Amino acid sequence: MAQSASDPLKSAFYRAEREGFRLSFSRTTALVGIVLVLMGAGLDYNTYPGNLKPFFLARVFVSLLIFVVYLILPTRWGRQRLSYLTLLWLCFPQIMIAWMISATQGAHSIYATGLHLAVFAAGSVLPFNTKQTIGFGLITYTLYLLACLIHDPASVAGSTFFVNSQFLIFTSTLGVFCTYFNERSRFELFKLKEEVADKNIQLENTNSSLVEIKGQLLQQEKMAAIGTLSAGLLHEINNPVNFCLMAIAVAQEDPTAKTSPMLAECLTDAKEGMQRVQHIVSDLKTFAYRSPEKGEANAPFLVEKAVDSAIRLTSHELRGVNLERKLPADTLVRGDEAAIIGVLINLLSNAALAMQKAQRPNPRIEIAGDWIDNRLHVVVTDNGPGISEKNLSRVFEPFFTTRDVGKGLGLGLSISYSVIQRHGGTLAVTSQEGEWARFTFDLPRAE
């Protein structure tokens, strides 16, 4: 018998494939057997014409029995008993041949050749296992012995019976070897198919990973290019802002401004507006331009300041949103401040857009934090429409988005997930559809 499969799963697959193979061969060989049994009528006509009629009726009867088994084999009951039914229909011709031997010349009957043919076919063509082939050989020899005894008990002591018996043993032995190597060859073929299938799956996974990596690299290149461009633009913006602030400061010292309340108020408003622009420029510099070679990607920073920057940069999207903070007094962590600001921007922006799309009457976002095992766990919760259960496991997949076409690439949460992973943490999501959504990530404490 062939060796068992390398693991239970493959063994189950192998058994299923083997049973399908056996069913196909058993039914096909059954039809061939019916044809051969009926064609044997020509042999009856030339060798024993006196027995032509009873022999022909026997052949028709045996063919009908084989055909009944042929119809039963594909049924559920038949599949469960495939080996036994195959052995059964093979015994029908053997019983018929044994009866013909007893009815003609016993040990000297030429029909003994038919017994050899069936035994050889069982071992070389039919998908039997070794035990079944041995069993079929024993059944065949027993039928031949009984046929000779019924015809003439004394014939079993003759040389003809001895020679035919030897040939039956030889044929059965050859059939056993054929069965063993056929079964082993089928198993090796199955293993080869499994290996090819595994390699194909690995290749598909590798291709998918390469496509994902390529997409992430392209996105990083785009972000790097945008960062470089932004750094130059922000520098150019910052210069006129500083000039304006200097001009406002000079104007505020002018006696006219000091004697005119309205002018003083306008200058104060202008100064606050320019300072706001200055803050935004500073936040954009932090987010878009950093120097990893100077260690900024693994430096201490306050999460509270990162939250402030993210809120300022998304202020246009957070209009009308009630923003609550529940951060601890100490929020000093270690990591890439710019990248964490990007994560917060993404979470706040997604929450604001989701609540806006759902038209929440009282939109609210809560940013909370808590220290657990020297890691600051940050939780961003919104009372938006939530995330459906079917999409919950896909939100971090690259290019997955529920926004309208052209409203997003579906890379924000995927990149954010990678950022938190680089900090040794996990970005997780929970939600109740129609009620709320909550994103949680953790950062290491600064030593």
Image: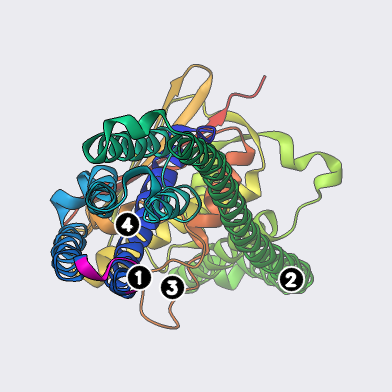
**Mark 4 or mark 2, earlier in chain:** 4
> Which residue does the image show at 51% across and 54% down from the upper left?
310
Residue 49 sits inside the magenta stretch: yes
Residue highlighted by disc 2: 243
Left or right, 141 with respect to 294, comes to left
Element assignment for label 2:
helix
* Amino acid beneath label 2: Phe
Residue highlighted by disc 1: 43
| Marks 4,2: beta carbons within 8 A | no
Could you say which is closer to the camera, residue 235 or residue 31? 31
**Mark 1 or mark 2, earlier in chain:** 1
Cα distance in 3D space between marks 3 and 2 = 23 Å
Element assignment for label 4:
helix
Q: Which SS type dominates the magenta stretch? A: helix
Q: How crowded is mark 4: few (under 14 residues within 10 Å), some or many (20 or more)?
A: many
Residue highlighted by disc 3: 262
Could you say which is closer to the camera, residue 424 or residue 274? 424
The magenta segment is 46-50
Q: Please, is residue 4 above or below residue 37 in the view?
A: above
**Mark 1 or mark 3, earlier in chain:** 1
Could you say which is closer to the camera, residue 264 or residue 389? 389
**Mark 4 or mark 1, earlier in chain:** 4
| Marks 4,1: beta carbons within 8 A | no
Residue highlighted by disc 4: 23
Cα distance in 3D space between marks 4 and 2 = 89 Å
Q: Is residue 292 visible?
A: yes
Left or right, 233 with respect to 137, comes to right
Could you say which is closer to the camera, residue 51 or residue 271? 51
Q: How crowded is mark 3: few (under 14 residues within 10 Å), some or many (20 or more)?
A: few
Element assignment for label 1:
helix
Residue 44 sits inside the magenta stretch: no
* Amino acid beneath label 1: Leu
